[in-house]
Image: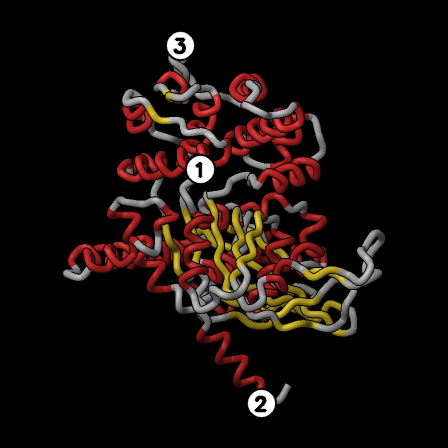
Amino acid sequence: MSDFDSQILRTIIDTARDHFFIVEANGRIHDVSPGSAAVYGVSCEELCSSTVQQLEASGVLQPSVSLEVIRTGQPAQVEQQTSTGRRVVAQAYPVFDNGKLLAVVSRSMDMTDLKMLQQEYALLQQRFSDHLKRSRDLDDEVAALESEIGNLQIKSRVMHEVALLLRRVAPTDATVLMLGESGVGKTAFARQLHRWSSRHSGPFIDVNCASIPESLFESEMFGYCQGAFSGAAPGGRIGLIEQAAGGTLFLDEIGELPLAVQTKLLKAIQDGSITRLGDSRSRRVDFRLVVATNLDLAERVEKGLFRLDLYYRLNVIPVTLPPLRERREDIPGFVEYQLTKLNERYGRDKILSRDVWQVLMGNDWPGNVRELENVLERGWLASNDVIHARALDPCGPEAPRRETAQDVTETATASSANLMEDEGLKAVLARVERDILAELCSTLPSTYAIAERLAISQPSVVRKLKQYGLRVGEG
């Protein structure tokens, strides 16, 4: 290595926010960043005169992530409890020379720093919200938005603030992380963000990460060439990332990705390029990334279930969508919109009785907008010309309890099996099947759980959900 390269490497190590270890293949520590001493409670000189085996044995590294890489030859991530009482997430990567392990480079981050970053994000969001509330032009901005967000059916102040934030970041290519409970409307807002962006004429590729088996993720996301594997389609196939070129790639349920898959996705995001399976040529792909989750990603990082570096890549513009119970003024708009859709779909003109509003406005809707839509559809199917409160009560008038997966088949069949005018058996069966799947989508966490409940294969569930335009966890 030249003096020039050595100086650059030294500067990177000395100034990095993360704490670096460079470890030789035999475990001896070659170099560390200055901040490592404070985290691990041992001076840099002592660290550099020791080995990772000794540090693990003495309890300084609990455990050593570099030693794990030396043992396996594979990248690793662990959570450590240091002798200074800190909780640290450490990641390590092997360095090979002609197939032989040369060294291990590890970096760790004190979770205290992560908590501080979370607090900074929360503070920035609060300041932005306060700024909007103080702004004299807010009412004018909200009025201007109404013509653009009619399909979102929002009336609450807090959701208008979310929409304004998305409207302002839409022209950029910054990654947006949608946070919120399942069913709050994350997908709908992601689509609106795409429509506002300069990429609106490009594709919007919607990917449910939880519905893609880990074994198929690479071929689905990156595509493959002809002959890449047994059963590959003639001519190969373009991946979902390439399909998003010039547009927006929306990754829903990002928190469900297995660690091995996260590594591949991170590389694609960092490099801005992908390599199809069976191909030696990388391809540049220009896309805007939007992701969503109903999980606490920071908590998953702490548990070692989510990569810290991927978390940083995704958490650029975090946007939290509040649950429906915290914005009940949005409920009437959702109800009227859904009722119109149901009447148009089935060619009827049913109306709501006045007694339904006590049920609709009084329920907490733990499943949020998706649950509200499902309850309305079930009530619509179970009613004649007028929909009364007893048909909409999510708990039922006699048994105040939440419906479970075990009740789904009976409920959906009872509410759907009545023949509509000029409707044949095939149409009725399709309608009953769709209602059962819709109920399970709102009550079960994944396509695997639905498959187990229905005693069919997971690919069959994915195919049927696609057929009826349904998705698990669509928020």
Residue 84 seen: no
Residue 127 in the image: above or below residue 444? below
Q: Are marks 1 and 2 in contact (CB under 8 Å)?
A: no
Hey, which quadrant is residue 307 in on the image? bottom right
Residue 120 in the image: above or below residue 332? below
The kind of secondary structure element at disc 1 is helix
| Comparing labels 2 and 3, the label whose residue is closer to the camera | 3
The image shows residue 218 at horizontal and vertical percentages of: 69, 56
Residue at screen point 77% across, 61% down: 236
**Residue nearer the viewer, 53 or 315:** 315
The image shows residue 196 at horizontal and vertical percentages of: 40, 62
| Amino acid at the residue labelled 2 | Asp
The image shows residue 233 at horizontal and vertical percentages of: 80, 56
Pick whichever of labels 3 and 1 is earlier in the sequence.
Answer: 1
| Amino acid at the residue labelled 1 | Lys
Quote the CA–CA distance across marks 2 and 3. Answer: 80 Å
Residue at screen point 59% across, 38% down: 468
| Comparing labels 3 and 1, the label whose residue is closer to the camera | 1
- Residue on which disc 3 sits: 398
- Residue on which disc 1 sits: 341
The image shows residue 42 at horizontal and vertical percentages of: 47, 62
- Residue on which disc 2 sits: 3
